[in-house]
Image: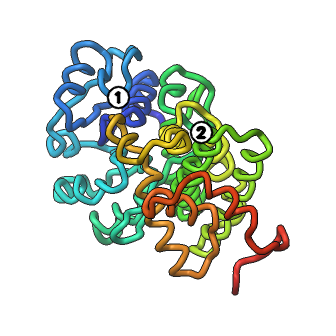
Amino acid sequence: MERATSTVVVGGGSWGTALANHLAIKGEPTTIWAREPEVVEGVNTERENPIFLPDVTLDDSLSATGDLKRSIREAEVIVSSVPTQHVRAVWSGVADVVPAEALIVTVSKGIEIDTLATPSAILADVLGQGAASRIVALSGPSFAREVAARHPTAVVAAGADADRTRLVQELFSSEVFRVYTSPDVTGAELGGALKNVIALAAGVVEGLRYGHNTMAALMTRGLAEISRLGVALGGDPFTFAGLSGMGDLILTCTGGLSRNRTVGVELGRGRSLHEVEAEMNMVAEGVKTTKAVKQLSESVGIEMPICDQVYAVLYEDKPVADVARDLMVRPLTDERARPPA
């Protein structure tokens, strides 16, 4: 972009903070809206997000606010980093003051349980007619703490409007953050959401002390499930082999910073979901997404055996020790099996 752009990041979690700091370092005037007063105070006075991204020094130009309506009235770019299940409520409260020409970037990864909508679809619904063309989804393998540490990272910006998608690409790209573009919003968002369910299963594999064979099988067949459902819902098959599909899946299934994998590890060690969630101060989106995926897959007749087993563990109290066997003794099939027409 030729000039600095006024940007507001809605959501003061680790990912929103990392992206806001990235933009601030680039010289973009950026403000974080956070619900928690401690986050606002920490960003403004201590140059740190003490709750969600501690021990990371934030750029001096970055500011934070607790007044969402006031902050977005004049914003040119608004980044939505709210957990998926809360996107509708947060944005419904400010829809009347969102500038008509503001570019909306959604970085949440999940599926709304009540409507089975992705974050961009929720935003389009809340903001009304014409909003869909102003919404771009940013997704891909990107742990917040590693972005904050300026480790080289690559993601994809997916939008229906090519010009606006390129604007997002230019806004976020730097020498340590490379952004590719795609027109496949559906595929990019579904890849980012569904991989969290497989990451829960990957954590269970780790918690049960299974080895590399098991993990490789899980990730490969997990990608097959993601692709089957994604294509059935309108995604491009190529997308699921890219950054927001395979790339994000690899990261969340193998990286120790993955919240979803962490939940799965604890489940694999025999702890209950309630116990694990009670100790976390951040959302593991895959837990709620699993419930939405169960409904989606059944509605379009797509078989997703791994996701079904994750659902059974989370919501039907199935013992994790039974999962691997039940997956392994299913009727034998061709690896290239296609979903029903």
Label placed on residue 321: none
9, 330: nearer the viewer? 330
Q: Earlier in the sequence, mark 1 or mark 2?
A: 1
Left or right of 188? Residue 216 is right
- On screen, residue 306 versus residue 53, left or right, reads right
Is any part of residue 158 visible from this angle?
no
Question: Tag 2: residue type?
Answer: Gly
Nearer the observer: mark 1 or 2; the answer is 2
Kindly indicate the quadrant of the structure image that contains residue 154. Answer: top right
Determine whether label 1 and label 2 are within 8 Å by CB: no
Q: Name the quarter where the C terminus is drawn.
A: bottom right
Residue 48 % position (x, y): 32, 18
Q: In the rendered view, does 213 fall on the left or right side of 315?
A: right
Label 2 crowd bin: few (<14), some (14–19), many (20+), radius 10 Å: many
Mark 2, residue position: 207
Numbered disc 1: secondary structure: loop
Q: CA distance from mark 1 to mark 2?
A: 25 Å
Quadrant of the rendered image containing residue 12:
top left
- The residue lying toward the viewer, choosing from 104 and 200, is 200
- Please determine whether, in this image, residue 210 is positioned above or below residue 148: below
Percent coordinates x, y for residue 222 in the rendering: 67, 57
Side (left or right) of 87 relative to 163: left
- Amino acid of disc 1: Phe
Q: What residue is drawn where x is 20% and y is 33%?
A: 36
Residue named by callout 1: 52
Q: Is residue 323 above or below residue 143?
A: below
